[in-house]
Image (cartoon, rainbow, N blue to C red):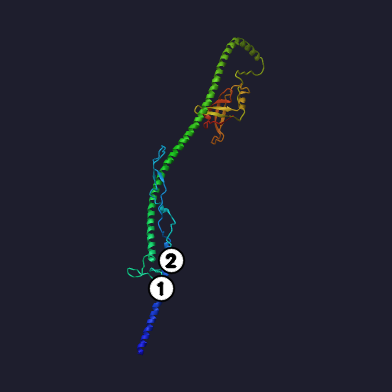
Amino acid sequence: MAKVLRGLVIVILILSIVALFFSNELFKKRELLMKRNRVLTEQVINLAKTIEAADAPDAAAPELLKDVSEVSDRELANPERESVLENYPVKLEQANLPTLDYDNDAKRIQLKSYYVLGPDGKPELDPVDNMPRVRGPGSMQELLDQMFERAKAQQATLNKTRGELTKMRELLTASVDNINKLKIDGRITKKELTETKNTVVQLEGEKEQLEGRVAKLTAEKKELSAELADAKAEIERKNEEIVTVTEDLAQVKKMNEELIKKLKGLAGGGLDASVGGQVISSMSAGDKGKILEANDELKFVIIEFSNDAMTEMLGEERQNALPQFDMNVRRIGRTSAAGEFVTRVKLRQAVRGKNLVVADILSDWQQAPVEKGDVVFF
């Protein structure tokens, strides 16, 4: 009997050691499961914060009408338009919608409990199979199913947003192509308008110049008409004087013969008389005037001389004849091989009562076309 008891004690001792070993291993597994359950709970709570709790409410799209009428030079009071955002889901633009909130004590307990716990803290039994209930309100599966359904809805919203982005990209591409075409047409139209504007400005300038020349030529015509009338009157007067002079010619001839005889007896030089007045052969150096008008085709210019230059050439009373000598023309600021020199001109005719003289352009000396404002110097 003692041997049996001894063997039984040994067996119980061995079983106790085995039970102690398994108890220690189970404790380690229990700690691992608790940590894993805690990590999974925290991750589910964090994941729930990234999932929207409900879809955005529907909203009306803003009215955006696109002008689809053709571009022409005809003004349209009411162009044809079409809506661009007619079926656009504006609710997809709403951001920062509320997310699922499992970060509270009740939700944490519900996530940690596999079974549905009753008020007494014990699992509730399913009336169908009389087993602990793991689904339905208050269960961990309820929160996971809710998060899964909201994740599917959010994925559907994401896919719909992607589809709308594709439509918007196509609409934007078409609009950009249309804008690029309009910009090409606009550049061509703007270039044509600029050229037309420049042409109009040029024509207006030429018109003003022509009007100025017409006015000047009209005034000169009046002056020449007056001079012609004076010349005709002068011719008539001269004709009358010729008749009188003819009668006295015989007497004057006789007096001249006697005077010549007396002059021959005088010592020294002779006498130089000029009916038209004294003609000078040179004048002082310096700027004398400027070009008022120039015609390079007909090779003549109109020079406006200073009062001093006119006095030097024609005398104080403008009684002398115009000297027929050459003068130089230069242009201030002109840079070329010849410097400021432009050409030489030959004085031809003075305008009575004015400081104006008509001169011929000497082509052999010409370095550049004569322009208005060029300086005349001697």
Callout 1 amino acid: Arg
Q: Is residue 296 left or right of residue 316?
A: left
Circle 1 residues within 10 Å: few <14, some 14–19, many ≥20: few
Q: Is residue 68 left or right of residue 238?
A: left
138 w.r.t. 233: above or below: below
Q: Nearer the viewer, residue 14 or 281?
A: 14
Q: Nearer the viewer, mark 1 or mark 2?
A: 2
Q: Is residue 141 left or right of residue 361?
A: left
Q: Nearer the viewer, residue 167 or 196?
A: 167
156 w.r.t. 328: above or below: below
Determine which of the numbered discs, if any, sits on residue 157 in the image: none
What residue is pinned by disc 1?
30
Instruction: Give the x, y percent position of residue 126.
Output: 34, 68
What residue is pinned by disc 2?
106
Callout 2 amino acid: Ala
Residue at horizontal 55%, vertical 20%? 226
Instruction: Give the x, y percent position of residue 339.
Output: 55, 35
Q: Quadrant of the C terminus?
A: top right
Residue at horizontal 43%, vertical 39%? 189
Per the image, label 2 sits on a secondary structure element best described as helix
Per the image, label 1 sits on a secondary structure element best described as helix
Instruction: Give the x, y percent position of residue 367.
Output: 52, 32
Instruction: Give the x, y percent position of residue 93.
Output: 42, 53
Q: Are marks 1 and 2 in contact (CB under 8 Å)?
A: no
**Quarter-of-image position of residue 290:** top right
